[in-house]
Image (cartoon, helix red, strand yellow):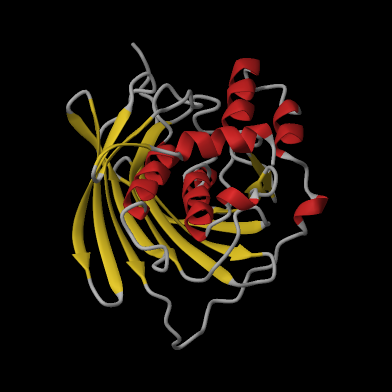
Amino acid sequence: MSQALQDLLDLLDLEQIEEDIFRGRSRSAVVPRVFGGQVAAQALVAAGRTVPADRPAHSLHAYFLRPGDPGAPIVYTVDRIRDGRSFTTRRVVAVQHGKPIFHLSASFQVHEDGLDHQEPMPAAPDPATLPTGEERLRGYGHLDPEVVERFLEARAAVDLRYVDEPPYGKFGEPREPHSQVWFRTNGKLDSEVDDPLRHVVLATYVSDMTLLDSVLLAHGRGGWAVGDVVGASLDHAMWFHRPFRADEWLLYDQESPSAYGGRGLGQARIYTQDGRLAITVIQEGVVRVPRARD
């Protein structure tokens, strides 16, 4: 397991300070606030710590309420909403400086046999044939070197490979609002941390990295890396359909059906490399064009 992956697992681990109350720390992100995927993943860890291990997470619904301060700890308070025979529901509030910055509801379910169908996996090239994230980023002479280094540091634990040029690599002309990314952790999880919740938490962390790319593509925008939009995640929802491993290749197939009123919607499906639909993701975010200064 790589040191970068170990550092990420340490970041997503939480200190229990009281029953159903946990504390997490943050680290610098690409933008000067706490990365949304980190808060969502830590909140899911907090919820999962209060649920029996035989009940994996099957969905989460979250709202980003305030920008997080990366220099301050985050306190996560878990409400045990319901413990039923099949389903368990938890609500988590993340607090900084006495104010809620994030709210999550998560549901967990005992495994059941049942009906089974799925949308087929779309065509995509083998991830081994694609350039790595570092190869792409270091090849873009128009990006500020400091931005490139921040990207590489923030994504060091993840092997993330775009099928086509990312928004910040090719912009200026609208493209189809569709993006594909292969991802996996940089290294296999060691046996002592290899549990189903850990894989779900890692996928939650990565899911916030690229989901609004398709909004940018539709308008020929390069995004936060080039400064032609400003924005932030507003809400985030995930449904975990089938077991998967975050340290094996996953295809993140993303599209945007709408942008309006300063908001953009991204929706996506995540497939295992052998074609099983593992996760569905939907997110809305603020996406604004900076106003010209007089």
Residue shown at 42%/68% (left/top)?
54
**Vertically, is 250 above or below 136?**
below
Residue shown at 25%/62% (left/top)?
89
Judged from this view, the residue extending furthest toward the bottom is: 115
| Residue 260 percent across, percent down from the top left | 33, 47
| Residue 161 percent across, percent down from the top left | 69, 46
Judged from this view, the residue extending furthest toward the top is: 294
As rendered, which of 140 and 186 lies closer to the eye? 186
* Residue 16 seen by the camera: yes
Q: Quadrant of the N terminus?
A: top right
Residue shown at 63%/58% (left/top)?
250
Which quadrant of the view contains residue 123?
bottom right
| Residue 248 percent across, percent down from the top left | 67, 56
Residue shown at 69%/49% (left/top)?
188
As rendered, which of 21 and 113 lies closer to the eye? 21
**Vertically, is 228 above or below 45?**
above
Judged from this view, the residue extending furthest toward the right is: 129
* Residue 284 seen by the camera: no
As rendered, which of 144 and 134 lies closer to the eye? 134
**Vertically, is 136 above or below 200?**
above
Q: Quadrant of the C terminus?
A: top left
Tally of numbered discs: 0
Please indicate whether residue 229 sits to the left or right of residue 161 in the image: left
Please indicate whether residue 40 sits to the left or right of residue 96 in the image: right
Please indicate whether residue 155 sits to the left or right of residue 104 in the image: right
